[in-house]
Image (spheres, coloured by chain):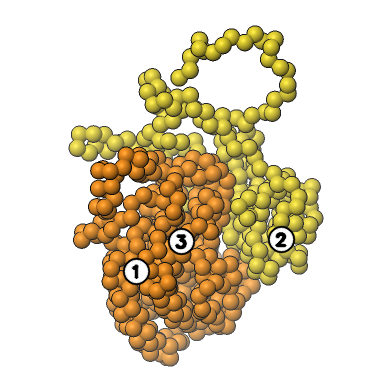
Amino acid sequence: MSTAYDEATEGKVYSVNGADWDQVVAGVRDTEDERLVVNMGPQHPSTHGVLRLVLTLDGETVTEARSVIGYLHTGIEKNMEFRTWTQGTTFVTRMDYLSPIFNETAYCLGVEKLLGITDRIPDRAQAIRVLMMELNRISSHLVAMGTFGMELGATTPFLFGYRDREMIMDLFEYITGLRMNHAYIRPGGVSVDLPAGAVDKIGEFLKEMPKRIKDIRKLLDANPVYVRRTKDVGYLDLTGCMALGVTGPILRAAGLPWDLRKSQPYCGYETYEFDVATERGCDVYSRYLVRMKEMEESLKIIEQALDRIAGPLKGEPVMIEDKKIGWPAQLALGPDGFGNSPDHIAHIMGTSMEALIHHFKLVTEGFRVPAGQAYASIESPKGELGAHVVSDGGTRPYRVHFREPSFCNLQAFPAMAEGGQVADVIAAVASIDPVMGGVDR
Amino acid sequence: MTSPDNLPEVPDAQVPDVPQAQEPPVARHGMFGAQDSGDTSGYGGLVVRRQPQLATPRPYGSYFDEIVDSLGLDDAIERVVVDRGELTLHVKRERLVEVSQKLRDDPALRFELSLGVSGVHYPYLTGEELHAVYHLCSITHNRRVRLEVSCPDSDPHIPSTVGVYPGHDWHERETYDFFGIVFDGHPALTRIMMPDDWDGHPQRKDYPLGGIPVEYRGATIPSPDQRRSYS
């Protein structure tokens, strides 16, 4: 990369963004300190994706830590400005690919706020959203714990985590047709009602999962190696969290019971009974405990949501009863995993011209959203996921910006790692649980 | 389309000379983006105007009056907007740091958690094309507020708030990267997502999305920003 810096005026400039490694090394060689600059990533098995860390070491101590991001920037926010509001869900689901349901929900809540239909979303759709989100929270935490174990050198938690996550992936595939990138939550509701048998499958999952969580706890909770690698490591107290805008399990591990599901409920979370997990250690081990506790709490919520879906909300609609917004077809999942609706096709092609027009208009043109801006935020597994949605009154978003918790939390990484041992850098990054798809968007 | 010939002739003198409310500027004409041939859609005469800028008079409702009163910096606030249950304070850019400092530190306000900076580009708002939007959250009082600051394209400078909210470091870099807003006083305002030698600021409205036409079964599908659209 050619540098555009004027060295005469700015002095020697070392940007660590591109292929300028030779310059960085040469620059450090000139100084008298015994410093070692270590580059980690962007391709490194223990940096959770394409994250690059530049560490300055004094012996084994990290004196300076910088993270370089942007390797996975895909322009999702820009792309969304060229698709309809509904199509936007297919983009946002790919941001933080380990918690797709949360991305979709945050976006849809923002759009619904702009449309002014927040109160008109059917209860069944809200219950399904809660159910899916909590399933997703468990799967995200399982990956966080599994990869965490592996990065510290233990492969069994990794195998456990992915094995158990597979149960949730199977459920997602059964319900939405896809293991990831579902585009299941839509403005106005959800795309498909739960297919026949889904309630039973989730019931089986609820019986099995507590055992699996116990297994992981048995493996790690009091494991001396694990505890020594994580306790008092990656310390970030409440003041640091507040200053750096850190939310989610890291904040709760610093002792603050701040959980948007409790403090600013959405999707009817105020009607579910669950506890907010907190710890006081401010360290990596506390964050682990918070995540484990959250998985157990999520199971409680899933159970309550399932009772409602199978009981009082049975047969209720899952999409808003507004012909101008609600997707016209009640899609059914085909054997190939694709959604289709034979009844609906027969209706629009055979009997109702108006229905055909409606379908055509909604699918090709989409709905218009009144001009304005809204901010909707939800508690994702990583922290507060916010969607700042701006409309100019058209059929496409004017601007969508996501307050990605991974992005904000990763910023706190130097505060956790500097002054610690180089081996603890891995533990600190893993405890943040950054997903680069979400960080870079 | 209506041809001017069909209209009844009205002598100029008969038009009553009443002061007309100034209509907001036109956002777009027609539909589908087709300009090359004659209008066959019937939508050619469609005129869509920009939404007027909102400014909410007092009382604002909810806890919003309390926030504005506690802040007590009315001269620093250009206008207050309450829309969809959210409070937006449009702040003069030179007073931004003062306002956010008070929002953070005043015991009655205590917006200790900032949720970052988001940029929006409104090329049609002459003199205030670039906006930086800050979402703040008070954990003490469980409240939210949004600050909005604008700057002209010709002078894209906004004071940095990293001193008040250290977490804005990356957010301001991101907004600089995507919109070209220069945050004065930021410790190291460099690009964060795009490569360092990238030209332009991709999230601006005049920056093309890019893409190539794709051929599928004999038909060519243009890239997303070249397709016909409804708005």
Q: Residue at x 26, y 59 (%)?
A: A333
Q: Amino acid at mark 2?
A: Tyr
Q: Depth check: A204 or A32 in front?
A: A204
Query: Chain drawn yellow, letter?
Result: B
Amino acid carrying label 1: it is Pro
Q: Give me the disc on residue A45.
A: 1
Q: CA distance from mark 3 to mark 2?
A: 29 Å
SS at mark 2?
Answer: loop
Answer yes or no: is residue B105 visible.
yes
Where residue B35 sits, quadrant-wise, is: top left
Q: Nearer the viewer, residue A237 or A206?
A: A206
Answer yes or no: is residue A55 visible: no
Mark 1 vs mark 2, foreground winner is 2
Q: At which x and y percent is residue B185?
A: 66, 52
Residue at the limit of the structure toward the front, as seen here = A351
Q: Position of residue A141 (x, y in %)?
A: 41, 74
The x, y position of residue B165, in whole percent, is 64, 61
Residue placed under numbered mark 2 in the picture: B63
Which residue sits at x=34%, y=62%?
A193
Going by the numbered disc 3, the residue's amino acid type is Pro
Q: Which residue is mark 3?
A: A122
Chain A pictured colour: orange
Task: Name the residue nearer the viewer: A196 or A53.
Answer: A196
Q: At 58% across and 35% down in the image, what residue appears?
A: B50
Q: Mark 1 falls within which chain?
A: A
Front-most of A368 and B225? A368
